[in-house]
Amino acid sequence: MRTVLTALLSFAAGVLVMLVVIGHRPPPEHAAPSVAASSSAPAPSASTSDTEDNDNGDNWPSQGPSPEQVIYSQPALLSQAVSKLSPRIPDKTNLYLVAFAGDGGEDVFRNEAEYAAQLFTRRFGPTAHALVLENNPGTLQSHPLASWSNLEAALDQLSTVMKPEQDILVLYMTSHGDEDHNLLVDMDPLPLDQIGAPDLAGILKKRPFKWKVVVVNACYSGGFVPELRGPGTLVLTAARTDRSSFGCGSDSDITYFGKAWLVDAMNKTDNFVDAFQLAKRDISDWEQQDKLTPSEPQIDIGTGITQQLATWRKEVRPGPAVRFNPPPSSQ
């Protein structure tokens, strides 16, 4: 996918510039539906599709850096973010979270990524470390972009900070997904590459991490499982390969899966698999209450990963629950 997109980069950039000039934003392809939630689930979405949510004009802030300035600031922003990670605890299994919020058109993804970082570092103690990559008009100068290039660069830098044969990489991807199993990566008007299931698998296979937990929170995310499964890898997805997941949208603070797995379940247990089962039950209850087609979250457990996670948990003394307080809206 990226080869084709790179070949078309010059053309795409020209089109984007023209569209910005005339004040029109093209909707992303393969819109993923967003459905209203019940009072017990995350807040409802204001619209029924990604196209509607993302076709409201350019979200670029009127006061702030230019797109070119943002692009050129990425290496420094990323290196700064990595340098701020808490020190690795020697002689113990450490856990490193990379939270990736792909769609800059809705705050819900930024909210989840930032909360995941807060949850892991505050609740699970000094062996847990967190790095946030996010696309959002409110954080262009404070957080590295969630882009293909930054994801690769972040993993490369982490591989020198971690002990790849011992420590655990947790990759939490949250965005919209399409029926062809691509994640929306968007910070208009920047021409960012989209990330499909084979792409994400290829990115990880090039890195030396032996132990991985990959969470894909998006519609149709079950399609990532066949590409990502393997020894030493736990894969969690918000939906099966042919189903939508729910709770995104401009009026939502957090998705169904984000609330169920991160906010509710991971504040009750430090066991990722147990948390998934709790989250799956809660999501099913919310969907039945709202008469939605079940999303059916998926799990795949590779050999050895549960034992390695258990080794990490032996050094964890979970702290109190971390409250979910989304930042002010950037919209």
Image: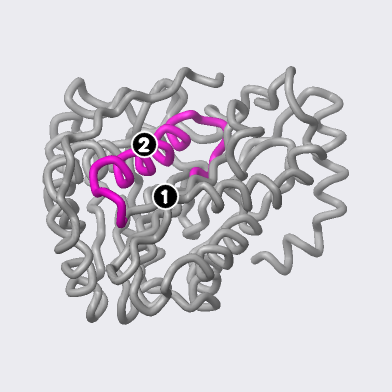
Above or below residue 252? Residue 275 is below
Q: Residue at x 62, y 61 (%)?
A: 153
The type of colouring in the image is: one colour
Q: Nearer the viewer, residue 105 or 222?
A: 105
Above or below residue 225? Residue 122 is above
Q: Residue at x 19, y 33 (%)?
A: 291
Magenta span has 122? yes
- Quadrant the C terminus occupies: top right
For mark 2, what is the residue? 115
Q: Residue at x 45, y 54 (%)?
A: 98
Above or below residue 11? Residue 197 is below
Query: Which of pointers 2 and 1 indicates the residue nearer the eye?
Result: 1
Q: Which residue is drawn at 16% across and 67% down?
A: 310
For mark 1, what is the residue? 130
Q: Can residue 265 be seen here?
A: yes
Left or right: 199 in relation to 171: right
Rendered image: mark on residue 296:
none
Magenta span has 26? no
Tell me if mark 1 has few (under 14), some (14-19) or many (20+) residues whose alpha carbon lies within 10 angstroms of its own. Answer: many
Q: Give the range drawn in magenta.
A: 101-127
Left or right: 196 in relation to 287: right
Question: Residue 81's spot in the image, x, y percent?
Answer: 56, 47
Question: Residue 185's spot in the image, x, y percent?
Answer: 58, 47
Question: Residue 277's spot in the image, x, y percent?
Answer: 13, 53
Give the main secondary structure of the magenta stretch: helix
Question: Residue 7's spot in the image, x, y percent?
Answer: 81, 64
* Residue type pointed to by label 1: Ala
Where disc 2 sits, the SS reads helix
